[in-house]
Amino acid sequence: MSSGALSGIKVVDFGQMVSAPFCAKLFGDYGAEVIKVELPAGDSARNTGPFPEDVPHQEKSGLFFVNNTNKRGVTCDVRTEAGRALFNRLLEWADVLIENNLPRQMQEWGLDYDSMASVNENLVVISITPFGQTGPYSGWNAYDLNAYHLSGASSRYCGRPGEMPLEHGTFAADYFGAVSAAAWGLAAVYGRGMVGGGQLVDVSCAEAIAAAFVGGQNIGGYAQDGRFDKRTGVGMPLGAPATIMPCKDGHVWMLALEVGQWQGLKEVMGNPEWADMELFDDMLARAQNADIIYPFIEEWTMQHGKMEIMEKCQAAGCPITAVFTVAEAAEQPHLAARDYFVDIDHPELGSIKNLGAPFKLPASPGGPTTAAPLLGQHNAEVYGEILGLSAAQLAQLESDGTI
Amino acid sequence: MTKALPLEGIRVVNFGWVWAGPVTGQTLSYMGAEVFKVESQARIDMTRNLPPYAEGEPGFNRSLSNHACWAGNGSISLNLKEPEGRKLALELISTADVVVENFGPGVMENMGFGYEELCKVKEDIILCSMPGAGLYGPFKNVRTYGLSLTSTTGLDSLVGYKNGGPIPVENAYSDPFVGIFSAFAILTALNHRDNSGVGQHVDFSQQEAIMQMIGPDYMDYVLNGRVGGPKGNEHPVAAAAPHAVFPCAGDDRWISIAVPSEQEWLQLKAAMDNPEWAEADAFSSLESRLENIDELHAALAQWTAAFDDFELTEKLQAQGVAAAPVLNVADLLENPHYKARETFVEVTHPLGFKETIYGAYVKTSKTQANVKPGPWVGQDNERVFKGILGMDDVRYQQLVGDEVIY
């Protein structure tokens, strides 16, 4: 058993792409024993890049690599009777199943929650889907993009008025759903004694964001007063400066709202005369005159680099930061000093950097240590050691294509 | 639904303020923990003064957004500038399992609530600290707001219109994200405590938690040295086309459509009655559609523009195409899917007014969260000081009079 915080918890990951695999990875990174079960064709993330030099290869997907550390991998064709029987044996062994297939797909495989609960009543089933297991949209086909835009987040907070609302350029809904699933799912596991067995943890990525991000700040006001806001394309419409602004070599998050912050920024800019105009007295006045003040500030930022602006403004007490590119984020000394990046040996990719533990547990350290599994890499080990299948039985399952 | 909630018996003392820390408390509370925010009228949290207010009447106990974001937390009011106030907080911590805070590094120590101090009153306490950039490292004292912290993770560099500069996400996506994420961190530490008997000081860097979201682009940098920019609504790792938001009939109405597979492309074409443009070589495979994605999206946008967003969604879903309307805030409250899932609920605040908050944002089949709106300042004072700490009424009244319990 591992010495990790979740040592002793057994997880089956039956997910593809991002949400369920990332959720299961969080369990694995903190010491749970995770077995990833793939259909014989493999998790579709394996066919999705980024690949080295953009050459597709099932064992070289960066997306698969990053979200499947600390797991052993097996194949199982749940579409056949033999495969389903094998899968049920894994469910008997497991404490948790994590999956993100559409509800109708799980039904079709005979793996709806009630069927799985009848195999193991202590099993916690964590289902992460765009719209959830119930409600009129639960039967819809959907992906991260559809979930994100159903949450209200883009209409309210991202994009310019009149132009299309925007997702975040990553799997923002999948990640939000995965983290919600990890918290609620682990609570369900932790509290099984209290609750009296396992249960279904039904996560809709769209709902989690609609509630905890958009709803929290907006729904009470709309329900009471019938008024609501939309995206403005600016960081903060009621305070200025509060926006992303170009500079000499990229962009900075320009924020100076409170009196001390604005004074600090003025000093860093060399106390220009325009900054003392009455129009710019407080953050609201500055926001009302954003058309005037933003070009003034931009004239200054365009003459300076983002790191210089960040350093000087931070020293002057302003919460101004450089907008790091992914490379700059990956190379920051701070994260290196915190050992945030780890090297992982992968049989096909070689030694590769990976994002490390998302949080630090000094008494029971976590984080990725072993590489994402090759397709079916641990078939013999898992089915042999855990389920006690003989070599002959394994050979049979292999020859009939179950694994 | 009569079963006990999974975290019943776990007590949390929450110094978390503004948004992220209170969401940590909320998440643990919805799963059954007993959570008390420690706050004070001596320093009212800024989110308590955010309009709109219940019934339009201003007051720090009436902010509607505060009550939604803090729902589930209880509240005790202690003036921590007073030694007696700090002593009472420690007394409560001695009965607790978990302490949460999202100040900058060192602030808890300065108040006398450093991890070592907490261990003196509760040996196996779990302290979850969630500063912006972690408890140590050269950047640990960075000043950011929740909505700009994402700039230090690379995430902001990916948000915006294609070929343009980054566009700000206009609120802190990171706050509820790390609030929920830190609840998972606390649960791992609780599990470790049950396994080993020891507590610990969790170093939860918001920056590092958020940066997990850029995994796909980080890998492209690691594998290919490539640095991506804003993507519009295109697929994060270019594995679907079309993949965007398209205009529909009406003011600011849009539909999202995502087509990763060949089969779904055929279904989309069928839904469009196989128009001639869609048969062009330029769109004949995913690879060519990705290569000609601007042209593809422009052609599709011409088709979608005449439809009602909900009707077009039904039409596309009937063919198996992943499509959904883009909802605004008003739509959320009226939407049949969210209504069916009771995503938003009207509740009566202990102060008497009705307000709408969000309920359990994850559904559990055996247990049902006890959803209660965010507290008024000091709502649980009597329960905590008299009930849990056994204080007599004379002393309680004296401390209230002295503005220690305040």
Image: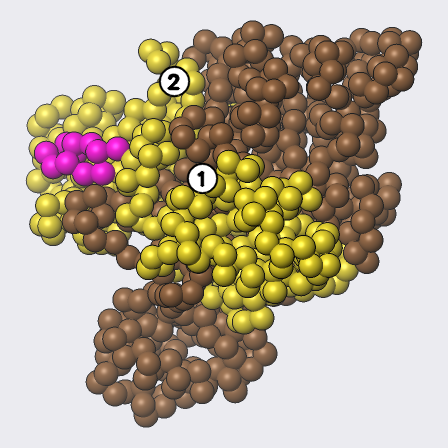
Chain colours: A brown, B yellow
Residue positioned 71% across, 19% down in the render: A79
Q: Residue furthest bottom?
A: A273
CA–CA distance between discs 2 and 1?
33 Å
Looking at the picture, tell me which residue is in the foreground, A368 or B393: A368
Foreground: disc 2 or disc 1: 1
Which mark is drawn over residue B367? 2
Magenta range is B345-356
Q: Residues within 10 Å of mark 2 (few under 14, many from 20)?
A: many
Residue positioned 14% across, 45% down in the render: B54
Q: Which residue is mark 1?
A: B314
Q: Residues within 10 Å of mark 1 (few under 14, many from 20)?
A: some
Q: Are marks 2 and 1 on the same chain?
A: yes
What is the secondary structure assignment of the residue under circle 1? helix
Residue positioned 27% across, 79% down in the render: A289
Please state if B109 lies on the left or on the right of B388 as rendered. right
Chain letter of mark 2 equals B
Chain letter of mark 1 equals B
Q: Is residue B187 above or below residue A218?
A: above
Q: Position of residue A294 (x, y in %)?
A: 37, 80
- Amino acid, disc 1: Glu
Q: Is residue B346 magenta?
A: yes
Q: Is residue A248 magenta?
A: no
Residue B212 appearing in the image: no
